[in-house]
Image (tube, rainbow, N blue to C red):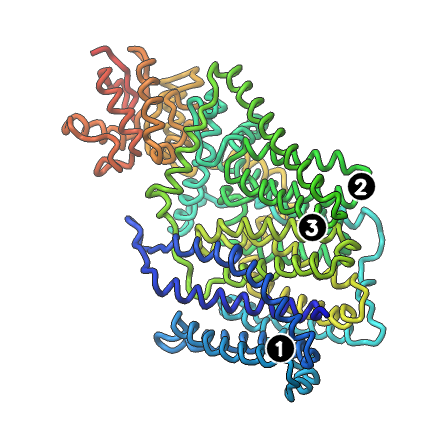
Amino acid sequence: MRAPFLATLVLTVTLACACFGAVMAVVMAAVEPVPIPGLDATQRQDAETALYVTAFFVILPAALLLVPRLADAVARGPSRSALPGLAALLAAGLAVGVLVVRLSSVVSGGGGKAALLAMLCGWGVVAAGLLWRAASPRPWRLAGRLAALERPLALAAAVLLLGTLLTVTRLASLDPLVLVLGALLVAAVALTASRAGFAPHRVRAARAGLALDGLAVVLLLLTIPDLVLIRPEDPQASLLDRIVAGVIQFHHDFLLGPANQVLGGHAMLVDNASQYGVGSIYFLSAWFELVPIGYGSMALLDGLLTALLFVAGYGLLRLAGTGRILAASALAVGVVALVLSRIYPVGALPQEGPLRFGLPLLVILAEVAAERLPRRAFALDAAAIATVALSSVWSLEAFALTAATFAVVVLVRAWLRPPGERGRAIVRPFLAVVASCVAAQLVFAAATLAAAGELPDWGQYYAFLHAFLFGDLGNLTYDFVRWSPGLAVGAGYLASAAALVLLVVRRRELALDERTAVVAIAGTTAYGIFQFAYFVDRSAPHVLPYVCLPLLLAGALWLALILRWRSPAASRLAPYAVVWATALAVLLVAGAWDSANDRIGNTALAHVVPGGEGPVAAVDRMLHFPPLTPAASEGQRMLTRYLPGERLSVVLAQPNVANETLMRSGRANQLPIADAWEDSFVPDESVPAIRDAVDSLRPGRRLLLDSGMVFALAALRTHPGLDPLRPAVPGSPAAPVQVFALSELRQRFRLEPIHRGRGWVVMRLASR
């Protein structure tokens, strides 16, 4: 006799979360924070990474292996009727404990790791005693009471679980009006769900065809892209606005610098490299062949890709059988909570968006479509495999994320096949992926050889990985904030993974009937767990919205599955699931509403509605973005006047100024410096190429230096023994590789100034 599915799931997730909480409290108390040099912050990244691995790859498998057996043991004994009530009681008790610990944080020194560990130890002793007694072969007097209180205990557990989300929520961010209106909505949904004859599996949108889906897609495409980003031309810009502009420029330059070098003819992994991969930079370069390169056009692309990512999510829900109302509602909540409420607007931090982490969703979409459309399965499977192959050239982290997600989907699809077909269903896709990745690498190598005359040197890219994984750059991370909302997100992914495994293993008939939805849940859950590692690595709260879309999709898929699940247990559960999901959506929207309300006026939707500013002018401004650094405009003028007609120019300036000056001039740097700060991360790879480039220059060549580089040149002349690859020349904003290039130029040539402008000097190389 097997235990009921829902009781087993609740017990498994509850015990897993409690175990992780105890381990987390011990580890974080034992590991002292490490100061980050140069920043007023600390980090415990090794501990956080170990906790992530422990949670998903040790505690979760152990819980799935042991807890269902314990639940089955109870179900076989005389206390079997008490199991659902007992599972709800333990879940409610854990939630109460968490709330008490969080409330104790209002007391000085309270709410910390010691309090959490003490609560979990006490809860664990009680839980162990109750479970041991329930599994005993002797009759238990409390069994009947727990069985009679099953529904009240389940309702209490659901309400308390929602309450625990408040422990990781900044209460001041909750909009009171949204909460009031949301409460009325929850009450209306609850009243509707309580009516006799409520048939949740029939609650769908009216079948108006593809027009409604098209409308949802259009709204996503208009609501997500930001057509303003920032206004650097505003004379009333505050100090905070200038800081935000600096943050945006700093992050964009890591991508725009290498892409601009490609536009100038520098091949990736030959004389140009980026920490963000290879294929991604070529993709950006292709975009900038269509539009002018710049910060606005980069932000516009990120907005379009983000919108397309959400459109792909909507398509995934629809392919998996989710009704239009539920799919559209889920994505609407996602737009408010995950897009419009971001600390930085869409387009500000492209390294954290679809350009870097979006490929796995294409794989999931193709595999789910293959399940839904078996006649086109071969072509759709080929598309998924081709996406994995593309990711092998895109970047290593994109390949790891995409390949891991693909592997989970393949394994789940194989498990749903008859036993005799499983081996072939696993081996064939994996062999096809290996062959496709090898072919992709050969094509890339041949194309690089034909274009640049050299084979790509992947060592240039791996040097970045080594610096971030094993070097000092790996210390540029942060501690989790106390009561981080990331804990709730991680628990959500853990619960979805546990439910998936239990469904596939213990309710195989249902999994086979809903195989398309199961594949979609497997893909989104795996995608989310693997992508969640990025948040664990960065830990900053502003990163969290970028890793939550898979959880949103998985939650919508689970709710749709419950609504379609035609069984007495599902019929009883469905109304409560709808009400709970509605309450959760209200909480998310209320927490994000203030920020979303401020951002909605910058979206494409606000520009196309009657009375808006007009989308054409807004897009034109993004494509011809105002300068972020005033010095770049003067540098552009100097290049046009004193170094005319060049596609490649020698420019040494403050890194952000140099990048913007070159982009606005339609030029690339003749020196192999894509982004000076990025190249300075791996000087051993950058220095030889810079030395070769300097050797190729001839007397009479002109170059452009800003005042900071002139200061660095004076420092080199005053201190001939100065190491140019030191972190920086005191008093100069130049990056180390720039100072090294200047040192090489000085040793080989005499630098003769021929014109001085506002903050710039044009120099000519003369023979020594």
Q: Residues within 10 Å of mark 3 (few under 14, many from 20)?
A: many
Res 303 quadrant in image? top right
Q: Residue 640: x, y in percent? A: 41, 21
Under tag 2, what secondary structure? helix
Question: The residue tagged with tag 3: helix, strand or loop?
Answer: helix
Contact flag, marks 1 and 2 (Cβ < 8 Å): no
On the question of residue 613 being in view, the answer is: no
Looking at the rendered image, the quarter that the C terminus falls into is: top left
Identity of the residue drawn at 39% across and 71% down: 112
The image shows residue 221 at horizontal and vertical percentages of 66, 45
Q: Which residue is mark 3?
A: 520
Left or right: 706, with 436 as reference point:
left
Structural distance between the alpha carbons of marks 3 and 2:
15 Å
Measure how far apart labels 1 and 2 are at the Cα level.
46 Å
Among numbered discs 1 and 2, the one appearing first in the sequence: 1
| Residue 190 is at least partly visible in this image | yes
Pointer 2 residue: 374
Q: Is residue 371 above or below residue 676?
A: below
Give the image quarter of residue 155: bottom right
From the image, tell me which residue sits under label 1: 135
Above-or-below relation of 118 to 334: below
Disc nearer the start of the sequence (3/1): 1
Of the pair 496 and 70, the residue shown nearer to us: 70
Sequence-wise first label, 3 or 2: 2
SS state under label 1: helix
In this picture, is 297 found above or below 148? above
Task: Say which of 9 and 200 sits in front.
Answer: 9
Left or right: 328, with 104 as reference point: right
Please state which amino acid type lies under the numbered disc 2: Pro
